[in-house]
């Protein structure tokens, strides 16, 4: 599993380099974020542009990452492919994250931090 | 046209093996011109079903095999993919089979559910899923048109 992190002013943009976030890597995924988010205050945008597939364990891992943020702060997801969007919509979890069409939009001036 | 076998194999019941076989199936479905939407549905339902076998049937022990068979039937009037899984785990509890509801979403993100979506996704995306318990084996079959 591979994550690429860009540090922006007051924000982290984390690109998931894998094609799948599934049960096989969910634990690794959570551990990697736990290390990454130590001491970070500010927005966290996860770029999912390369992720073609998310299963319920992968979804659970994204929820777990959100819980690592300060209480009340939402995790932001960008660049959702169709199959990923479908899983979020089906489980109604699309409402608990902030969704952006792509990472560029997430850091555009029209978007405010959640 | 006779049915075409996309996958017919047995593999150890681990999350990593499930992931690898779903990747192979994705390639086969694309090669057989299954449209993106039914393709995603098949892969999502199978992911949940197979991970459920690994986690609950084999208690994530890595012991036990899963036999997966996927056939594509192309006919003049209808194309369909037929999927069958066989495992030797304990019988699947009835409450999972009858139907499942979504875990409730709370306002406080700290209480958000991290699991419990699997059976709901299976029942929502697979029109009908058949379960049989035969000779100490669990057999799931379902079919998706394309």
Image: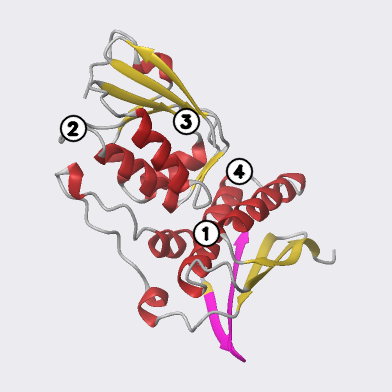
Left/right placement of residue B17 relative to residue A68 reads right
Q: Position of residue A106 (x, y in %)?
A: 35, 18
What is the residue that sits farthest to the bottom in this orientation?
Answer: B135
- Front-most of residues A84 and A8: A8
Q: Residue B17, located in which quarter of the rendered image?
A: bottom right
Q: Which residue is mark 1?
A: B45
Q: Viewer-nearest of labels 3 and 1?
A: 3
Q: Residues within 10 Å of mark 3 (few under 14, many from 20)?
A: many
Q: Which residues are magenta?
A: B130-145
Q: Which residue is mark 4?
A: B36
Provide the chain ID for the residue under circle 2. A
Element on which disc 3 rests: loop
Left/right placement of residue B96 relative to residue B75 reads left
Q: What is the quadrant of the N terminus of chain B in the image?
A: bottom right
Q: Residues within 10 Å of mark 4 (few under 14, many from 20)?
A: some
Element on which disc 1 rests: helix
Left/right placement of residue B34 relative to residue B97 reads right
Element on which disc 2 rests: loop
Q: Viewer-nearest of labels 1 and 4?
A: 1
Provide the chain ID for the residue under circle 1. B
- The image's mark for residue A48 is 3
Q: Residues within 10 Å of mark 1 (few under 14, many from 20)?
A: many
Q: Report if residue A57 lies within the magenta region.
A: no
Q: Which residue is mark 2?
A: A70
């Amino acid at each position: 599993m591979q994550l690429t992190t860009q540090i922006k002013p007051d924000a982290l943009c984390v690109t998931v380099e894998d094609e799948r976030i599934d049960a096989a890597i969910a634990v690794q995924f959570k551990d990697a974020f736990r290390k990454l988010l130590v001491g970070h205050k500010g927005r966290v945008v996860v770029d999912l542009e390369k992720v073609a597939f998310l299963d319920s364990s992968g979804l659970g891992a994204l929820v777990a990452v959100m819980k690592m943020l300060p209480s009340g702060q939402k995790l932001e997801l960008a660049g959702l492919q169709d199959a990923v969007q479908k899983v979020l919509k089906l489980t109604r979890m699309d409402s608990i994250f902030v969704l952006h069409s792509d990472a560029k939009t997430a850091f555009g001036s029209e978007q405010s931090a959640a | 046209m006779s049915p075409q076998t996309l996958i017919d194999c047995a593999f150890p019941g681990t999350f990593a093996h499930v992931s690898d076989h779903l990747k192979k199936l994705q390639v086969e479905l694309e090669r057989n011109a299954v449209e993106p939407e039914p393709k995603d549905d098949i892969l999502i339902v199978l992911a949940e079903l197979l991970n459920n076998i690994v986690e609950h049937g084999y208690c994530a022990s890595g012991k036990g095999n899963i036999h997966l068979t996927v056939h594509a039937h192309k006919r003049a009037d209808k194309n369909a993919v037929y999927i069958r899984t066989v495992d030797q785990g304990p019988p699947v509890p009835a409450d999972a089979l009858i139907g499942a509801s979504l875990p409730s979403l709370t306002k406080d993100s700290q209480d958000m559910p991290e699991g419990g979506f699997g059976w709901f996704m299976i029942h929502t995306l697979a029109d009908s899923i058949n379960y049989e318990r035969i000779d100490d084996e669990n057999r799931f079959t379902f079919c998706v048109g394309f």
